[in-house]
Image (tube, rainbow, N blue to C red):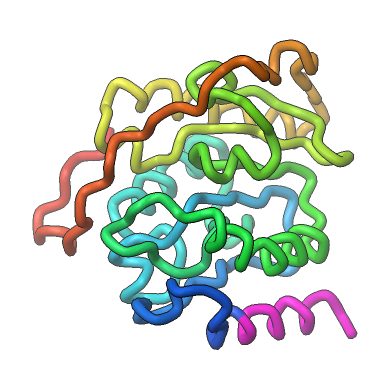
Amino acid sequence: MSDTNRLKIIREEILHCQNCALAKGRKNAVPGEGPSSVEVMFIGEGPGYHENQQGKPFVGQAGAFLDELLAAANLKRDEVFITNVVKCRPPSNRDPLPEELSACARYLDEQIALLDPKIIVTLGRFSMAKFIQNGRISQIHGKSHRVDGRIVVTMYHPAAALHQPALRPALVEDFAKLPRLLGGESPVEPKAEVFAPESKPEVKPEKKEEKPDLPEQLSLF
């Protein structure tokens, strides 16, 4: 079976998945989208209100900001693969639970194996935690790490910059590094700078219920 066909089968499995409680409250599962052969794969945390409505990743204000960040990195959405660590929306956009992350893990692992991206970009701390243990995103955002033979770049989630505008310059700067990585540079951080076993996980502010966009969108820059 070709990788393309297997990716299609995984997509169908996700759309009909009943492996955790998130399936009961979803309108649409969000398997992710993009070509079957990519250099860059983006992994976020979980679908929000708009993603649950449309079944597509990053389609709300955070998605619009992501599109601008991609353009700044000389990338187009149809050139990359975008997905999340959990494929269904957690209620009220709360953090995904361990059992929910576990239920989706096999889908994500197989997507990564089939796509075989040159670079994985994690967006948010739950995506980061899949690859970097005991890391603090405030300390290692924008840095590159060699994980199981792949380059993983850890970044803030675009939604974080919408809620905390002070993070926006860091995200823009971090995305600006991607063309150099794709061009062959591999500024992988030493292990000692990446891992901090004594550090405690960061506490993320509770998310508020995401509502449909107003007719007039906020400026993202």
Residue at position x 45%, y 27% from top?
202
Left/right placement of residue 211 relative to residue 96 reads: left
Residue 207, given in percent of the width and then of the height, sits at 27, 46
In reply to whether residue 3 is colored magenta, the answer given is: yes
Quarter occupied by residue 175:
top right
Q: Position of residue 101 (x, y in %)?
A: 57, 58
Residue at 89% over, 85% down? 1
Residue at point 57% right, 68% down? 33
Horizontal arrangement in the rendering, residue 113 relative to residue 27 (left or right): right
Residue 48 sits above or below residue 19 on the image = above
Q: Is residue 161 left or right of 156 when viewed as pictured? A: left
Q: Residue 100: x and y, percent?
A: 53, 63
Instruction: Point out the residue furthest to the left here.
Output: 215
Left or right: where 71 falls relative to 64: right
What range of the chain is rendered magenta?
1-13
Residue 64 among those drawn in magenta: no
Q: How many marks?
A: 0
Above or below 80: residue 32: below
Which quadrant is the C terminus positioned in?
top left
